[in-house]
Amino acid sequence: MSQQLTEQVHGHYIGGEWTDGSGNTFESENPATGEALATFQRGTEADVDAALDAAESAFEQWRDLSYIDRAEYLWDIYHELRDRHEELGEIVSRECGKEISEGKADVTEAWHMVEWAAGNARHPHGDIVPSEVAGKDSFMRRKPRGVVGCITPWNFPVAIPFWHMAIALVEGNTVVWKPAEQTPLCGQIIAEMMDDAGVPAGVFNLVQGFGDAGAAITDDERVNTVLFTGSAAVGHEIAGKVGGEPGKLAACEMGGKNGIIITEHADMDTAVHSAIMSSFKTTGQRCVSSERLIVHEDVYDEFTERFVDVASDVAVGDPLDEDTFMGPAIEADHVEKIRHYNELAREEGATVLVDRFELPPAEIPDGSDGGHWVGPFVYEINYEPDLRCLNEECFGPHVALLEYSGDIEDAVDIHNDTPYGLAGAIISEDYRQINYFRDHAEVGLAYANLPCIGAEVQLPFGGVKKSGNGYPSAREAIEAVTERTAWTMNNSEDIEMAQGLSADIKTSED
Ligand code: UN1
């Protein structure tokens, strides 16, 4: 990247102004090359405080607009995301290392979410509820909760911010957002879009920075709702803290130790295709990526041979090259984490079938020695419930093959035997097996004859167990960012109570 870019320090966006903050800075880096992309102010408690003040002051006026007027601002952003698709897709790929089709899909997913949220402004927002008493009309009405704190991950640096913020804003809340420290450039661009669209000052605020800035947002009493998507460790901390504060809510979506079941009735082409996509797309760094393949003994050898064949060959390389299947890992520390889990699997008795962790120099794109390169790691291991490598999320191209015998019930038992429950898939041509999986797999996102990645925005996105306590996207995010009021109106001149409760006032004279 040019010197010019790194010399400019991008600030926070608070109360409709670009602000400089404390003067401490950090850089965004291209994970494929290690080059700096741009420099940013690192947010402090004082920056968060200013952003929360701005969000709080802007709330009353913003909530007084109609849903449709609020959505108008987002339609501008929807068009800008579409118009700048190629350019923004490239920026996503440069900043987080996803190959270019994924970079562009991230932007597409963002405008889908904006379209959903802004379009939903014209849809009904409550319910008419029948009353026992003919003269009464009852309703469920929604109100915005106030200031929403949004903390988003690096792996979907444009889409996930809009999962949170498009909904929060259309529903009438104001927002303080901290993007992941690995993808501040995408954060900067989104803030510029909010500014270009004329979103009123204070309604949307961006504070760049690290976990300390995120904690300052989630801990502050001005924040009524926290929307979080990211690691289980941080999500549990947030959910625990926020859960202890009366009146405050957190909707958190965390990772998974996702599995795919390949039964004796699986179509092998579908099985191999789905498993490769699920394990290696995004270099295994989706929270829905699969790290466990649970394969019936009758098809185990055939599946393993074909899966290993492709995993040995998938193209790791320059994210901007259309022939690349996997880009780099996000950062050097993450490469170390992946190394740790690969070693752990070995220590726990794995037979390693593919080890491309250290890629040969020929596979590393020219001039990209400073990149965070890793390739697929595939191993087989005898299933035992307590193995750490089968329970802990690696968040990389690291996948276990587990052979099972018996019926679908046995496969689902293994599938469910992790502390997580985000996404899963079954590959089978037998509808009874598919239905058993649908009804018994402990996951929030379940697929049949498909990869376990790639959910569309109009679906609820979240998990069970350690994977989350909320669904910070689409319809379900509305639950997190609105209060429900049960509103009952009497149309009669008399007061008549439900449940047969007497409405007579009795006095001592009666
Ligand atoms: C994530 O994995 O962190 O379902 C989000 C998908 C995408 C979102 C993934 N729509 O794969």
Image (cartoon, rainbow, N blue to C red):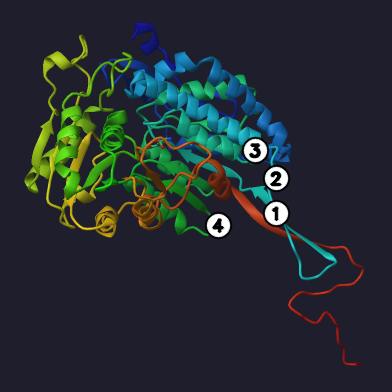
Calculate the distance from the C-alpha at mark 2 to the C-alpha at mark 3: 8 Å
- 361 vs 351, nearest the viewer: 351
Calculate the distance from the C-alpha at mark 4 to the C-alpha at mark 2: 26 Å
Q: Which residue is mark 4?
A: 247
In contact (CB < 8 Å): disc 1 and disc 2:
yes
- 20 vs 338, nearest the viewer: 338
Question: Which amino acid, by three-letter code, is at mark 4?
Answer: Gly
Q: Which residue is mark 1?
A: 127
Label 4 residue SS = loop
Q: Residues within 10 Å of mark 2 (few under 14, many from 20)?
A: few
**Foreground mark, 4 or 2?**
2
Calculate the distance from the C-alpha at mark 4 to the C-alpha at mark 1: 23 Å
Q: Could you say which quadrant of the image residue 40 lies in?
A: top left
Q: Which residue is mark 2?
A: 124
Q: Which residue is mark 3?
A: 120
In contact (CB < 8 Å): disc 4 and disc 2:
no
Indicate which disc, 1 or 3, sits on the residue closer to the N terminus.
Answer: 3
Q: Is residue 319 visible?
A: yes
Task: Name the quadrant of the N terminus.
Answer: top left
Calculate the distance from the C-alpha at mark 1 to the C-alpha at mark 3: 15 Å
Label 1 residue SS = strand
Residue drawn where x is 66% and y is 32% of the image: 71
- Report whether the residue tagged 4 is closer than 8 Å to ligand 1: no
Residue drawn where x is 28% and y is 40% of the image: 290
Question: Which amino acid, by three-letter code, is at mark 1?
Answer: Asp
Calculate the distance from the C-alpha at mark 1 to the C-alpha at mark 2: 8 Å
**Foreground mark, 3 or 4?**
3
